[in-house]
Image (cartoon, rainbow, N blue to C red):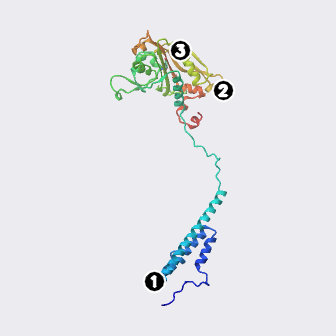
């Protein structure tokens, strides 16, 4: 039987595998390593691939021996490639860590945060300030009956006080029969709604939207008011002034300038109005002017009777603040229409 050569490549000639192995160990870049891997394992021309293909042409015995050798060589080369690759990757990361540093103290541009519009923000303040004085918040409908908005507040159909409130009447065909409906012209109807359900002692505020056919720098067809009501056995006008002055100072400024003067509202007796010094348009001339912001007074006995409350036993006060007007004074805003146009240049200032 023919003697099989031990080595396919004579020992005098360096086998391509030895060269390749040495090249792997000294490869400088990952790209070089990829190339060497191709030289060994490439599908068409890889030295190892070709050598393995050649196995098929050998005698069985030689094939077994050669097969084992080539398998060992394959594992060795794979391991070498792996080791070198890890070394090169490690080195690459190391130098990246040095060249590519992250400044953790760098501040990123802040995301802009939204905030409440100044009307709801003011109303939250109102609820907070009065909440601390023991007032609860009550809310009611913006579409009111004529009874709640006028009649039960001692403003009958023929009363001239109705003229002071340019009312949006709601077309009768769109509403249930049995009465006339309005967009509430004031938050005062909540006094009636609340007193019909609750007996004194009681203390409430009712913030909300109100509507009148009015439009100029200090009037808008939709605006906000908050009503206040306090009824008990010995609630006096002095109590009313104390509560209102506390609220005005807290909501606007401890130095806010205001004046009480008599005023007429059919649902209070006596009635008062509060004006506040408004710098507004006149700020430059430093003259200022008075802007009416509140109507108030002692609740009229007829109103108490309309709610089945005995006016001989109970009495109290009510007030209605104009929200926009208070904010105008607080921030010296000359035109109330700025609240509604949605101009961010205006809104962002607050
Ligand atoms: N509702 C009145 C208005 O809108 C303001 C007002 C005046 C409310 C006197 C009151 C009050 O509670 O007692 O003009």
Most distant residue in the top direction? 312
In this orientation, which residue lies closer to the viewer: 333 or 157?
Answer: 333
Residue that carries the numbered disc 2 in the rendered image? 284
Dot label at residue 239 = 3
Name the spot of residue 203 as percent of width and height, x first.
48, 19
Rendered view: 136 above or below 87? above
Dot label at residue 60 = 1
Q: Earlier in the sequence, mark 3 or mark 1?
A: 1
Cα separation between marks 2 and 1: 111 Å
Q: Can residue 161 be seen at all in this image of the molecule?
A: yes
Q: Secondary structure at mark 2?
A: helix
Q: Secondary structure at mark 1?
A: helix
**Picture quadrant of residue 246:** top right
Cα separation between marks 2 and 3: 37 Å
CB atoms at circles 2 and 3 under 8 Å apart? no
Whether residue 313 sits left or right of residue 321 in the image: it is left
Name the spot of residue 310 as percent of width and height, x first.
41, 11
Q: Can residue 218 be seen at all in this image of the molecule?
A: no
Cα separation between marks 3 and 1: 116 Å
Q: Quadrant of the C terminus?
A: top right
Whether residue 341 sits left or right of residue 200 in the image: it is right
**Is the residue marked by circle 1 packed among few (<14), some (14-19), or many (20+) residues within 10 Å?**
few
Rendered view: 35 above or below 213? below
Q: Nearer the viewer, mark 3 or mark 1?
A: 1
């Amino acid at each position: 039987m023919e003697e099989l050569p031990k080595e396919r490549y004579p020992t005098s000639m360096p086998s391509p595998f030895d060269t390749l192995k040495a090249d792997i160990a000294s490869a400088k870049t990952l790209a070089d390593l990829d190339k060497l891997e191709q030289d060994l394992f490439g599908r068409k021309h890889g030295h190892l691939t070709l050598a393995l293909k050649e196995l098929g042409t050998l005698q069985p015995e030689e094939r077994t021996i050669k097969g084992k050798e080539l398998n060992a060589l394959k594992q060795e080369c794979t391991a070498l490639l792996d080791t070198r690759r890890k070394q090169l990757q490690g080195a690459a990361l190391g130098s990246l860590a040095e060249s590519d540093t992250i400044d953790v103290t760098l501040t990123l541009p802040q995301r802009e945060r939204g905030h409440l519009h100044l009307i709801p923000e003011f109303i939250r303040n109102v609820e907070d300030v009065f909440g601390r004085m023991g007032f609860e918040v009550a809310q009611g409908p913006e579409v009111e009956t004529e009874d709640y908005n006028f009649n039960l507040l001692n403003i009958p159909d023929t009363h001239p006080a109705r003229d002071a409130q340019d009312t949006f009447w709601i077309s009768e065909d769109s509403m249930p029969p049995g009465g006339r409906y309005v967009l509430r012209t004031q938050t005062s109807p909540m006094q009636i709604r609340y007193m019909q359900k609750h007996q004194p002692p009681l203390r409430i505020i009712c913030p909300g939207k109100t509507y009148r056919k009015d439009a100029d720098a200090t009037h808008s067809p939709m605006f906000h008011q908050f009503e206040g009501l306090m009824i008990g056995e010995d609630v006096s006008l002095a109590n009313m002034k104390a509560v209102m002055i506390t609220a005005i100072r807290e909501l606007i400024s401890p130095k806010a300038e205001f004046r009480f003067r008599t005023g007429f509202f059919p649902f209070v007796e006596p009635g008062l109005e509060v004006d506040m010094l408004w710098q507004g348009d006149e700020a430059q001339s430093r003259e200022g002017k008075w802007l009416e912001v509140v109507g108030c007074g002692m609740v009229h006995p007829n109103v108490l009777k309309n709610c089945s409350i005995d006016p001989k036993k109970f009495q109290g006060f009510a007030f209605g603040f104009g929200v926009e007007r208070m904010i105008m004074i607080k921030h010296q805003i000359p035109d109330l229409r700025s609240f509604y146009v949605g101009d961010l240049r205006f809104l962002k200032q607050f």
